[in-house]
Amino acid sequence: MRNRSVEHRTPNTKCDFEYIDMSVKEPYDTGWKDKVKTRIKRSDGIIALISADSLTSTGQKWEIECAKEESKPVLPLWIYKDDRTKPAGLSPVVWTWDGVKSFIDSL
């Protein structure tokens, strides 16, 4: 399996992959779309965490569309076991570390 980065280690020690966490830690006041688009362009793939809030999150919708426009693979994962929200154009799956590993291996 290829390592994607050495910047962060997954919190689950049973996983043998590493990744760069490019999530935004502080809200962007202006130009946030340009900053996020730069991060998306540098990524091999995108994992979208899906919940009922995804239906009204204009920021998340834009990020996912941006990833698609940049031809980046998107893995939509349900983050709650009792929430099976399906945003338009996405087919979320249950979060498993094996599923995440398979996605990363496919990149």
Image (cartoon, grey):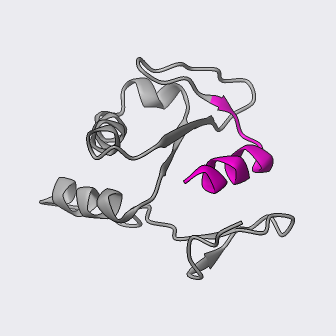
The quarter in which the C terminus is drawn is bottom right
| Residue at horizontal 45 percent and vertical 30 percent from the top | 54
Apparent side of residue 87 relative to residue 30 in the rendered image (left or right): right
| Residue at horizontal 13 percent and vertical 59 percent from the top | 31
Apparent side of residue 81 relative to residue 75 in the rendered image (left or right): right
In this rendering, is residue 16 above or below 59? below
Place of residue 88 in the rendered image (x, y in percent of width and height, measured from the top left): 41, 17
Confirm whether the magenta stretch covers residue 106: yes
Place of residue 6 in the rendered image (x, y in percent of width and height, measured from the top left): 59, 82
Q: Quadrant of residue 96?
A: top right
Q: Is residue 2 visible?
A: yes
In the depicted view, which residue is nearer to us: 43 or 52? 43
Place of residue 106 in the rendered image (x, y in percent of width and height, measured from the top left): 61, 50
Apparent side of residue 23 relative to residue 99 in the rendered image (left or right): left
In this rendering, is residue 56 above or below 71? above
| Residue at horizontal 87 percent and vertical 65 percent from the top | 14
Confirm whether the magenta stretch covers residue 43: no
Place of residue 24 in the rendered image (x, y in percent of width and height, measured from the top left): 38, 62
Magenta-highlighted residues: 93-107
Q: Is residue 27 visible?
A: no
Residue closest to the far right: 14
